[in-house]
Image: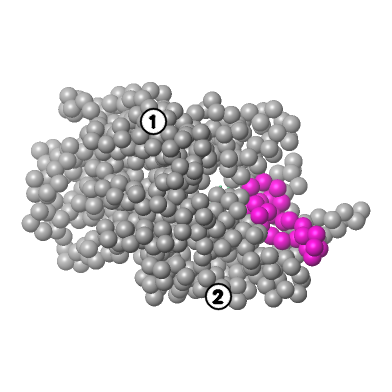
Amino acid sequence: MGSIPAQEQAGAESQAWWKSATFYQVYPASFKDSNDDGWGDLPGLLSKVDYLHRLGVDCIWVSPIFESPQKDMGYDVSDYQKIYAPYGSIEDVDAIVTACHDRAMRVILDLVVNHTSAEHAWFEESRSSKDSPKRDWYIWKPPRYDSNGVRHPPTNWRGYFAGSTWTWDEHTQEYYLHLYAPEQPDLNWENKECREAIYEETMRFWLRRGVDGFRIDTVNKYSKRTEYVDAAVTDASSSYQAAPEMWCNGPRIHEFIREINQVLAPYSAVSVGELSNTPDPQGVLPYVSAKAKELDMIFEFSVIRLGNGDLFTGKYIYKPFSLSRLKALTEKWQYFIEGTDGWTTVFCENHDNGRAVSRFGDMSTPELWRSSAKAIALWQTTLTGTLFLYQGQEIGMTNMPASWDITHYKDVEAVNFYAEALESGDEERIQKTKHGLSVLARDHARVPFRWNDDKNVGFTDDETKSWMRIPEEQGISVESQSGDPQSVLEFYRHMLALRQRYQGLFVFGTHQLLDRDNESTWAYVKEGIVVARDGRELRGKALVVMNFTSQTAPLIDVAKALGCMSQKVRLMVTTGTETSRLDDGTLSAWEGRVYCDFDLEACDLHCC
Ligand code: TEU
């Protein structure tokens, strides 16, 4: 490990706070219920801020808490300035912001402005008449008629939640556009007055109250292609066709996002936008390049979508994938920032996907569950970029039991896809959809957080009142894992501290994948700046090795991978429990380790 040339000493300290921060997504309905109505709430979240602080979280992202008819769990907002009463009040938000700021933590809210709820006053006004001053705030189009005089929607587009993207409005005799549920009409960003209202009433309103920024829902769908033509027929069995090219990354999208940036900039607010259907780095960079002044970060979904079938009709027809595919996608979004002024994010869970341990890990025994949840933790916490955790990931929460039938799925998307399969009458499709939902459904991430091992998991007083059924696993809870050095929770806590301590390596370092085609183990080298205890900045390397199988696997030549003499190699971390194995040249089932080429004694955090 040599000294760093002066030009490379742009140390971690000079970087924006959000780059090295650990973000944690709270899904408020399922986090903590303070008044025992079976629905999580803001006072519940407030009571757990200390828990998150101790875990090592720097910023909480709260999924939508605004007034809403809850057709899509609050992603259908009917009033951006009011809090949905079961969550609490606006003063509860203030209290959470204050509690976080007191602990040097931050809070971001979910900004859902591609669409509103159909119950939003703007839409009610817009649909009231064709002459309404707000008519043009949404996207209205006349019908088409076929040669038999039968009425059809303006285009053949399929929505994300199945069916057409258009709903007929009897009163004004036109269709309105909704990429999601009919109760979520799309706003017309082409209309300047509408954009100004979004900036003022949804963004500045909350920025003035002290929130630190936004996770921005569906950020690349605001500028639609304005021709409104049919999409190519890719599914001959359906009247509706996938058409993301009609609404993703449209002609004015960068102009709109630069405007958003100008709203956020005076508040130094952070932004992280959800970027669908943009799997190429050249498409992503314009959004996150520092000089473009658009977004700080985006979520790109290639990794989290692994296992999904075709995004539209076939989303829930499970598609198996190999470890080498997971590695390749991880590598792609690690390399993406090298040599650019962009930034990347790291995540493998959110409220729209199945649990990571049930998708990437191994659920066959409790031991393998734990080891694989820790391997996932090691993978995530050693990657370059801003790390986002989802509630429950830190205790290895799993999917709902496969034995649960469809009545336990509450999500509009799961319900609609299953209904569509039933309607097809195709038994194979029904069975495959059931299976796909058991792995991939959004519901898995939405069951109550497990605070303890009681029947009610410490989420609410009476488990029978919980808005989603509570699974019965034992040992997956904060209480049962706290203080147990082998637990998933303590491992996350440890890794988050290590990630902070060695952020030059883990957050900001380069990433080199070593064993691209190996389908059992995964190895990559991180290289970057390590700050020694005396403050010297040195260049160091860390080798991350993980066994992604339930069998013992050979360990690669660590010294060779690190490019140093074997005497210099130090073990920094192991997820394993059997220290006896450390020298036998193997990794046990799902074991992960980090080795480094520098003297840990020279640094103040001694690890394994
Ligand atoms: O999701 C946007 C989106 O299109 C997908 O990423 C989403 O996972 C969906 O399942 C697509 O089929 C955001 C929110 O994260 C999601 O919860 C909302 O349902 C959606 O927007 C609509 O607001």
Q: Which residue is mark 2?
A: 196
Residue 551 image-quadrant placement: top left
44 to the left or right of 435: left
What amino acid type is highlighted by mark number 2? Glu
229 to the left or right of 607: right
Is the distance from the Cβ of mark 2 to the nearest ligand 1 atom less than 8 Å?
no
Residue 504 image-quadrant placement: bottom left
Q: Is residue 64 visible?
A: no
Which element carries disc 1, helix, strand or loop?
A: loop
Q: Is residue 108 above or below residue 397?
A: below
Q: Which residue is mark 1?
A: 454
The magenta stretch is 157-183
What amino acid type is highlighted by mark number 1? Asp
Q: Residue at x 37, y 47 (%)?
A: 389
User: Which SS does the magenta portion mostly show?
Assistant: loop
Q: Position of residue 425 (x, y in %)?
A: 74, 31
Residue 453 image-quadrant placement: top left
State the CA–CA distance, disc 2 to disc 1.
49 Å
